[in-house]
Amino acid sequence: MSEEDTPQSKLALTQVLRRLPPEFVETVLTHVQNEERDSFATIMAVLSGALKYRPNIWRKWPKPRQREWLRDNLRSPRFADSAQHLLQEWFFSQRVEMLNAFLDVIGIEHDSEGCIRGDIPDEFDPEKTRAGAEALLEKYPPLEVSLYLRLFQLGRKGGWQQIADLLDTDPRLALNPPPAAAA
């Protein structure tokens, strides 16, 4: 099965990253680099060490080169955890109201920072799940909603069927295939 034939809900995070518009990725990387410096440094250090770069060599690079290097390496399945961390960092710092809105509608207890308290149910009410997605789509760009739901799915092995159904059936949540050159 080719990447183009893969159901939307089954795309790996690295496949998702290849499908994100470059300007969105740049926005996320620039924010984390400038505003979440400790997280950025940690991710850079993890990747540098894994790739056997000298420690902190990346600190001598200009900021645009750091972001380009990070973007290119985060597309590797080897660094999916780091990619997930970086995207979560952006959502928790830039879209906490999105996180809270979704959790409110589907009925999951959370704090004001979007962090879940207690256990997450094994299943969600399909109507509440759809209503949660609709609430987000009314206020946020479909790309961000789609990405958030995909990250939410990573919170449990196999995700939740109700969210997978949304990702597979709602065309607003679909991510376009990557350009042929980037595949």
Image (tube, grey):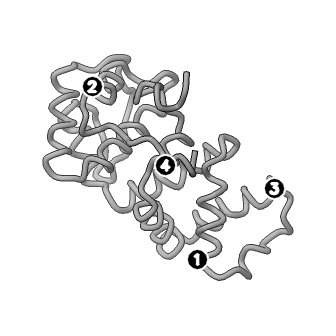
Q: Nearer the viewer, mark 3 or mark 4?
A: 4
**What secondary structure is marked by label 1?**
helix
Q: Earlier in the sequence, mark 2 or mark 4?
A: 2
Q: CA distance from mark 4 to mark 1?
A: 22 Å
Q: Nearer the viewer, mark 3 or mark 1?
A: 1
Residue beneath label 2, please?
169
Q: Nearer the viewer, mark 2 or mark 3?
A: 2
User: Does residue 127 lie above or below 148 as drawn?
Assistant: above
Mark 2 belongs to which amino acid? Answer: Thr
Residue beneath label 3, please?
51
> How many C-alpha atoms fall within 10 Å of the one at disc 1: few (<14), some, or many (≥20)?
few
Q: CA distance from mark 3 to mark 4?
A: 27 Å
Q: Nearer the viewer, mark 2 or mark 4?
A: 4
Mark 4 belongs to which amino acid? Answer: Pro
Q: Which mark is residue 64?
A: 1
| Percent of width and height locating residue 11 | 49, 32
Q: Earlier in the sequence, mark 4 or mark 1?
A: 1
Q: Nearer the viewer, residue 150 or 173?
A: 173
Residues at circles 2 and 4 in contact by the CB criterion of under 8 Å: no
Residue beneath label 4, please?
179
Q: CA distance from mark 2 to mark 4?
A: 22 Å
Q: CA distance from mark 2 to mark 1?
A: 37 Å
